[in-house]
């Protein structure tokens, strides 16, 4: 069964609807651009951060190619192990509370790292 509707006479309504849809997409686009840039910047497998790190390692610290490769191998260890952490998070439910259990379990380490980052550095004396 089809319903016959009269043709739209006011094309201004059609234009406004199209403009509303286009504005919604235009508002989401800058956010997606920012996210794509952040992901590409921090990618350990040759992202944008690789250029200044390579410069620092080769020119400032005078490392050889073998030492730079070793640094990149050690720096990529979290990338290699990330699937394991995700698998553990999916399978383990601490305190039966889901994500809140993880926050309660790891809050002391977060508090410790925040306090270390905010403390003043002073030379150790023995």
Image (cartoon, grey):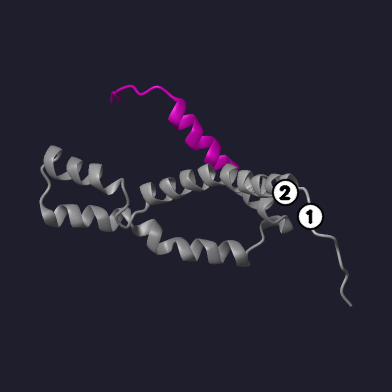
Disc 1 element: loop
Nearer the observer, 53 or 117:
53
Q: Is residue 75 left or right of residue 38?
A: left
Badge number at residue 8? 1
Question: What is the span of residues highlighted in magenta in the rendered image?
Answer: 106-126
Residue 60: quarter of image: top left
The location of residue 50, given as percent across then percent down, is 27, 48
Q: Residue at x 31, y 45 (%)?
A: 49
Residue 61: quarter of image: top left
Q: What type of secondary structure mainly makes up the magenta span?
A: helix
Nearer the observer, 99 or 101:
99
Instruction: Tell me, yes or no, whether the highlighted magenta stretch contains residue 115.
Output: yes
Q: Residue at x 62, y 43 (%)?
A: 23
Q: Furthest residue to the bottom?
A: 1
Nearer the observer, 64 or 115:
64
Q: Residue at x 67, y 61 (%)?
A: 93
Whether pointer 2 and pointer 1 mark residues with C-beta atoms closer than 8 Å, the reply is yes
> Where the N terminus falls, by quadrant?
bottom right
Disc 2 element: helix
The location of residue 103, given as percent across then percent down, is 63, 47
Badge number at residue 22? none
Location of mark 2 (residue)? 11
The location of residue 112, given as percent across then percent down, is 51, 36
Q: Residues within 10 Å of mark 1 (few under 14, many from 20)?
A: few
> Where the C terminus falls, by quadrant?
top left
Q: Is residue 17 left or right of residue 48?
A: right
Nearer the observer, 17 or 75:
17
Q: Is residue 83 left or right of residue 125?
A: right
122, above or below 59, in the image: above
Q: Residue at x 45, y 31 (%)?
A: 116
67, above or below 23, in the image: below
């Amino acid at each position: 069964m089809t319903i016959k509707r009269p043709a739209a006479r006011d094309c201004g309504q059609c234009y406004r609807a199209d403009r509303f849809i286009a504005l919604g997409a235009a508002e989401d686009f800058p956010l997606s651009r920012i996210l794509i840039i952040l992901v590409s910047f921090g990618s350990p497998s040759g992202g944008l951060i690789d250029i200044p790190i390579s410069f620092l390692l080769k020119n400032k610290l005078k490392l050889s190619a073998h030492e730079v490769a070793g640094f990149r191998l050690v720096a990529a260890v979290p990338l290699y192990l990330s699937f394991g952490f995700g698998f553990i998070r999916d399978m383990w439910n601490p305190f039966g509370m889901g994500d809140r259990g993880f926050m309660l379990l790891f809050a002391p380490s977060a508090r410790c790292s925040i306090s270390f980052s905010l403390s003043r550095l002073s030379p150790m004396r023995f």
